[in-house]
């Protein structure tokens, strides 16, 4: 275990997000975590595909975590496909059948069911790609210069 004061172990949902991001990279998707598509919403993983497709993946580590999520339907208008990522022991019958499903752990994931495609409008896609790029750039800068505090 690290003695670095900044080091904090990953929470169960963060481990799922890491496995999802690793898996999606194998499909030529890049991803960011905890992106805010609109006020009051924060997605666990947003992935950008090689053809500009946008997927949102919500990571649920338990039944209680899923049942407490009242906002997931608000994410649908911000992506081309929506997925849940859960562990092997999650009761997947709780998840809506029209949504995608991934089984994940901290190291990888597997797409079990594709979510239905709901193509974004060109204007919405442009907004989301810009948000994705800015979010990724801010995260990269924070990793390079962790002591820097932005005025924004």
Image: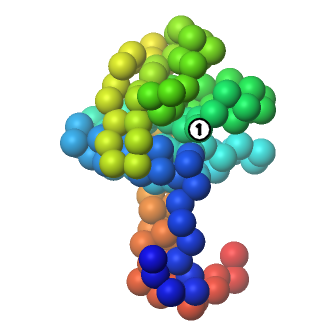
Q: How is the image coloured?
A: rainbow
Label 1: how many Cα within 10 Å (few below 14, some 14–19, many 20+):
many
Q: Is residue 112 above or below residue 122?
A: above
Residue that label 1 marks: 61
Q: Is residue 144 above or below residue 99?
A: below
Say which quadrant the C terminus sits in. Answer: bottom right
Residue displayed at 46% across by 81% down: 2
* Furthest residue in direction bottom, as rendered: 147
Say which quadrant the N terminus sits in. Answer: bottom left
Q: Quadrant of residue 11?
A: bottom right
Residue 141 in view in this figure:
no
Q: Nearer the viewer, residue 99 or 133?
A: 99
Residue displayed at 64% across by 82% down: 150
Measured from the top left, where is residue 12 in percent x and y? 56, 48
Q: Nearer the viewer, residue 140 or 44?
A: 44
Residue displayed at 56% across by 82% down: 6
Residue 115 in view in this figure:
yes
Q: Quadrant of residue 148?
A: bottom right
Q: Is residue 100 above or below residue 145?
A: above
Residue 19 is left or right of residue 64, and the answer is left
Residue displayed at 56% across by 91% down: 147
Measured from the top left, where is residue 125 in percent x and y? 48, 37
Residue 62 is left or right of residue 89, and the answer is right
Measured from the top left, where is residue 3 in percent x and y? 50, 87
Measured from the top left, where is residue 85 in percent x and y? 49, 32
Mark 1: secondary structure: loop
Please count the marks in the image: 1
Q: Nearer the viewer, residue 86 or 27?
A: 86
């Amino acid at each position: 275990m690290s003695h670095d004061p900044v080091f904090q172990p990953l929470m169960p949902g963060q481990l799922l997000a890491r496995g999802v991001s690793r898996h999606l990279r194998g499909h030529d998707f890049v991803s960011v975590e905890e992106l805010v598509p609109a006020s009051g919403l924060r997605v666990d993983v947003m992935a950008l595909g090689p053809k500009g497709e946008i997927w949102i993946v919500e990571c649920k580590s338990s039944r209680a975590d899923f049942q407490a999520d009242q906002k997931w339907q608000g994410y649908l208008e911000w992506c081309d496909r929506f997925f849940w990522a859960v562990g092997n022991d999650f009761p997947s019958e709780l998840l809506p059948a029209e949504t995608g499903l991934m089984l994940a752990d901290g190291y990888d994931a597997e797409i079990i069911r594709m979510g239905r495609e709901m193509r974004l409008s060109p204007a919405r896609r442009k907004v989301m790609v810009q948000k994705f790029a800015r979010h990724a750039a801010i995260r990269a800068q924070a990793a390079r210069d962790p002591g820097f505090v932005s005025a924004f």
